[in-house]
Image (cartoon, helix red, strand yellow):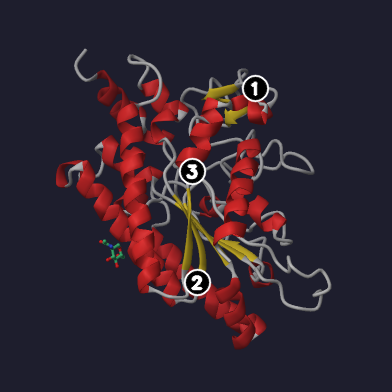
Amino acid sequence: MASPRGAHRRASVAALLLALSCCFCCRAGARADPSSSGEPKAVPAVIVFGDSTVDTGNNNGIGTILKSDFPPYGRDMAGGAKPTGRFCNGRLPPDFISEALGLPPLVPAYLDPAYGIQDFAQGVCFASAGTGLDNKTAGVLSVIPLWKEVEYFKEYKRRLRRHVGRATARRIVSDALYVVSIGTNDFLENYFLLVTGRFAEFTVGEFEDFLVAQAEWFLGQIHALGARRVTFAGLSPIGCLPLERTLNALRGGCVEEYNQVARDYNAKVLDMLRRVMAARPGLKVAYIDVYKNMLDLITNPSTLGLENVEEGCCATGKVEMSYLCNDKSPHTCQDADKYFFWDSFHPTQKVNQFFAKKTLDLCYQELL
Ligand SMILES: *[C@@H]1O[C@H](CO)[C@@H](O)[C@H](O)[C@H]1NC(C)=O
């Protein structure tokens, strides 16, 4: 009976990890003046970095077990079921944000061979499910580390210059909306799983500081490469994800210890963002309070017509994600719109749309 929660967690993981967090921000195109049709849009592209909360399919083509390009993932996509590698029954927040800004309804994954630079000129996603701010997080399930997402962004800029010319490429990169959502896996797939040794190297507070320093490095990188309008998501109440609730079954409910870590980390992120903006005039970063957005919904699910905020729709909803969430389960729910979670780690399309709306509202207020 010793340390049952930790033991279960270590034992059960392997396939089950990823990210949650969510959300973002932005600002629409020619909002003020409808007669300005000939002018460039205020937001020419949505450019995405991060983990599974925003990965639109990059993991499909890499050697990881962390995938979702099979049914029932994508089952509620507009126009018919289509598994795309999004960890959702439908679309992710960046897709809804892009559409609301007058851009395409899906943000293509950079590694998806079905898309080319002409598509990416209006939006591109470098995110990879399972990755984190810590290099070692990406190593756990062999996904794309954040530094590599930045390298892809550099390559993208070179391709964009060849495609549209130097001046237009510069305008796209500087006026784009950058959506960044990352961090959950650093705790749930790395630190608390004890698989990388970070738990022995750092106290949890020191690890938070280390991650925030990585986030600061990342923001400096993309700013130096031309980004000016950025939304940065804080952590959700990560102890309330169905998988964490399941592993906490002996005590019941959300893992308060994890939620406390999320709140501490978020406060440090907010301090860092203020510092970064003060040091880098021209860079605006909107902090997306995913913690509050998610807790509001969990506390008042009926505002969005939700009936279940504790289990995923897919399979039993208690542990399944990636390959464990598949067509074989007889338990998968009929109406995912009644659920907060699609699988044991990721929100439904309904909730993603809500997060996107929250983000857009904030962006109209803050970013521009
Ligand atoms: C992460 O890995 C990259 C590539 O190897 C390296 O350049 C970078 O310094 C690493 N970051 C840290 C904090 O170790």
Task: Give how far across and how far down residue 230 sits, in percent.
Answer: 50, 63
> The N terminus is located in which quarter?
top left
At mark 2, the secondary structure is: loop
Residue at image point 48% right, 43% down = 290
- Residue type, numbered disc 3: Val
Which callout, 3 or 2, points at the residue further toward the start of the chain?
2
Residue 313, can we see it? no
> In the figure, is residue 79 to the left or right of 281?
right
Q: Image point 63% across, 18% down: which residue?
A: 330
Real-space Cα distance between discs 3 and 1? 25 Å
Q: Residue furthest bottom?
A: 166
Residue type at mark 1: give it: Cys
Left-right relation of 360 to 137: right
For the residue carrying disc 3, how many other residues have a C-alpha within 10 Å: few (<14), some (14-19), or many (20+)? many
* Residue at image coords 46%, 71%: 283
Badge 3 marks a residue whose secondary structure is helix
Would you call the spot at circle 1 few (<14 residues within 10 Å), some (14-19), or many (20 or more)?
A: some
Asked if disc 3 and disc 1 are in contact, CB closer than 8 Å, the reply is: no
What label does residue 227 carry, if any? 2
Residue behind mark 3 = 290
Q: Which image quarter: residue 349?
A: top right
What residue would you read off at disc 1?
A: 333
